[in-house]
Amino acid sequence: MEGTLPAAAKTCAESGTESGPRGPGCSLRHFACEQNLLSRPDGSASFLQGDTSVLAGVYGPAEVKVSKEIFNKATLEVILRPKIGLPGVAEKSRERLIRNTCEAVVLGTLHPRTSITVVLQVVSDAGSLLACCLNAACMALVDAGVPMRALFCGVTCALNSDGTLVLDPTAKQEKEARAVLTFALDSVERKLLMSTTKGLYSAAELQQCLAAAQAASQHVFRFYRESLQRRYSKS
């Protein structure tokens, strides 16, 4: 799904880099990622976007309970744990969105009658939490060696009352925004895998946000490649 990116949004999206300072409004925050942190899961990753941090662990493909067994593909589960307290409605909603995204790219038919479980622990939430969870889940799945047809990433956009677009918003920017939209995109054709929105926006603004997210996803996928190159060049 390619969209025409307005000049202002395009300039802002392209100015966002993984290591550069945050720009006037549409740049991405600093990224950091570390894989293979935990010893018990088959794969793990810690992903940082600005001050938002999520730790992910992947278990499987492993034995599955008979009640959850699917005869022709793997059963994929996502568990999201908040920083404090027990999971609530918001966590269950994010679990469903992350699971739908993972199911769209994981080649579960290669491991029928097995279980793949993604456990996400929120370390800190400073905005764009769902996007950070998606990025952490992707890097943990890669670390676990789970077969996927493509990588995926999450990008959050916020629309202010004056119509300006902010990529990768902070918690304060999300609270002040008229609408907040999060997209999951694949690495092959930047196709839309999942979207969730909150607030009021027009159809034209939706297309503008999607186009800006597709442009920003290039930076996220480039960071994935650089992170993996650094890791495997050491070994």
Image (cartoon, rainbow, N blue to C red):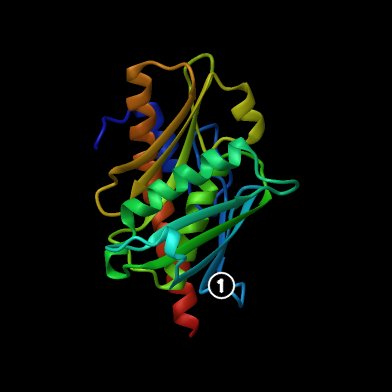
- Left or right: where 133 falls relative to 107: right
Q: Circle 1 is placed at which residue position?
A: 41
How crowded pointer 1 is (Cα within 10 Å; few <14, some 14-19, many 20+) is rated as some
Q: Position of residue 79 (x, y in %)?
A: 56, 53
Q: Classify residue 108 by image quadrant.
A: bottom left
Residue positioned 57% across, 22% down in the render? 177
Q: Position of residue 209 (x, y in %)?
A: 39, 29
86 up-or-down from 65: above or below: above
Which residue is more in the foreground, 138 or 103? 103
Total number of numbered labels? 1
Q: Classify residue 202 by image quadrant.
A: top left
- Left or right: where 146 falls relative to 168: left
Q: In which quarter of the image is the N terminus?
A: top left
Where disc 1 sits, the SS reads loop
Which residue is more in the foreground, 43 or 66? 66
Residue positioned 65% across, 39% down in the render? 88
Which residue is more in the foreground, 105 or 88? 88
Q: Callout 1, which amino acid?
A: Pro
Residue positioned 55% across, 68% down in the render? 44
172 up-or-down from 30: above or below: above
Residue positioned 26% across, 54% down in the render? 188
Q: Position of residue 224 (x, y in %)?
A: 43, 61
Residue ranking furthest to the right = 84
- Left or right: where 11 falls relative to 31: left
Q: Position of residue 35 (x, y in %)?
A: 54, 70
